[in-house]
Image: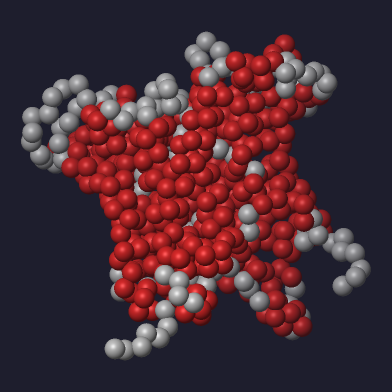
Amino acid sequence: MLKRDFSFKKITGVTLMLLCFAFALLPIIWALILSFRPTTHLFEPVWESPTAFTLDNFHTLVGSDFPLALLNSLVTAGASTLLALIIGIPAGFALAKGRSQKKFIASWMLLLLRMAPPVGFVIPLFLIYLNVGLLDTWIGLIAAYMVLTLPLVVWSSWTSMAQIPDELIEAALIDGASLYQALVKIIIPAARPGIIATAVLAFLIAWNDFFFALIITRSDTVTAPVAIMNFVSYASVNWGSIALASVVLTLPTIPVIIFANKYIVQSMGGAVKG
Amino acid sequence: MTTVTGVQPLIQKNYQKMLLPAVIAVSVFAILPLFAMFALSLTDYHLIKPWKGEFGFENFIRMANDTKFISSISIMLMLSVLGVIFQVSMGTLIAVGLEKIVPKWRFMRGIFVIPFVVPAIAVALIWLSLFTPTLSPINAFFDIFGVEVPAFLTTQYGAIFAIVVADTWASYPFVMLLILAALQGISGDLDEAASLDGATKMQIFYKITLPLLAPALLMVALFRFIETLKHFPLIFVMTNGGPGRSTQATNYYAYIQTFQSSNVSYGAAIAVFLFLFAAIISFYIARANARISDA
């Protein structure tokens, strides 16, 4: 086993892995390069002027509506995640530990809601919002994001709390705690890794949303993904600013990689037993 | 008075109370809009023309005769089937590779996950830049060897290919993570036993690992299939449905009908079609999932 394996198969395998690695990584490096490349060098190969560098795009971004859009994204994604956690965790707990014949229906409903095409939600929401004046408001967008975040939170707190032994809950209850106290003080901390991963993922889904925000926002509450499109016009495309804005938009999502283990897998659908 | 033993009675008592807020929220935010979508699809509601207050199936009859709608289905299926094949093969290849071929390259794992967290709009814009011939380093690279890379986004199948590539880049990590988890659930004893019996690594992979992975592969493929039916940012940014209508998948067509042509009720009818399509597939996922959980 210790001898080095230089067989044809091994080399093919390693080459394939390196190709996949290049495919995964190079577009990200490209986005970083584009972010700091002067407009004058934009259309010549990178290797002809590798040191060309500028912070122009940064100044463009700061001077545009983009920082405000980032704030809108932060508020709406954050608030909808928080609300979904407050409402969804007790429900996930009840589904995990309660006895009910209707669990299959609940799991199918949750799955269905996550699978349903957003356009199906957006058309009625748009008409309702149009009539009650919720278009282009934080509240309207937060409510719309609940469609994305709540089923996810219920589903994944269900799967992560199912693994907590009943004895732990009993011990808390014997000490005289109410069920809600036990939930907050014992059960949530015990399921913490799963809950944190859920929260991060719910935030990510709302933060990454483009479609809901495109329809529901107009000017005041435009979120960052929609605001990026301001750098694209028929006349010209401001590639540098787009690239930098994309990089900035991706930065808050990086912590998710830390959770890129079984918790994410559980939260993403619990479809496969790890 | 009976003594309460265990946690169950208390949970049963509070069961409905704990579920209620979520049930209300889901009903208001999700179920209500869905019902409204069904109701709208039966009207002739139009943003500009007033609604006469009648219900009927005209929208669905119109769909059956709408060649744009019918071709949108084949475009959607092409994007989904190609996308799923690419993503599942690549995700599985990387997962298996990380476990069996280069297990020592730990640092790779984190980097392989990065595309997964890049927001869809950024994915679309990055790949738009990579498929823009005057800008793209890919074109510049092949120029050195005198090879001209075609402008993918200007031809029908090229544009479909471009969207599939971008989607594959963003979505293979999902497949990879799920398959990695499934691989780690497979006991190493089987491999060892087979290898003692003289099986080669390839034989072990095809005869033992792959069959054991099959349920996970099916699940992840179905999952990704449904997700790819909902393509929006990639089409919106990279092709805008073009060239012509060659990348106008059904979901995008529903958007165009509703928000650009103001045919709200017709858009809703198309959304109903998509919804039923997704509902059938998710039913199979839920059933297969229940079966795996029981096993």
Residue at 67 percent across and 80 percent down: it is: B190
The single residue placed furthest to the right in the displayed view is A3
| As drawn, B90 above or below A42 | below
Residue B6: percent from left, percent from top: 42, 83
Q: Is residue A272 left or right of residue A31?
A: left
Residue B2: percent from left, percent from top: 31, 89
Q: Is residue B61 left or right of residue B34?
A: left
- The one nearer the camera, A203 or B130, is A203
- The one nearer the camera, B20 or B219, is B20
Residue B37: percent from left, percent from top: 24, 42
Residue B267: percent from left, percent from top: 27, 35
The single residue placed furthest to the bottom in the displayed view is B2
| As drawn, A263 above or below B237 | below
Residue at 42 percent across and 73 percent down: it is: A97
| As drawn, B73 above or below A194 | above
Residue at 37 percent across and 73 percent down: it is: B11
Q: Is residue B24 visible?
A: yes
- The one nearer the camera, A173 or B116, is A173
Quarter containing the C terminus of chain A: bottom right
Q: Is residue A19 left or right of residue A199?
A: right
Quarter containing the N terminus of chain A: bottom right
Give the quarter of the image for residue B186: bottom right
Q: Is residue A272 visible?
A: no
Q: How many marks?
A: 0
The single residue placed furthest to the front in the displayed view is A176
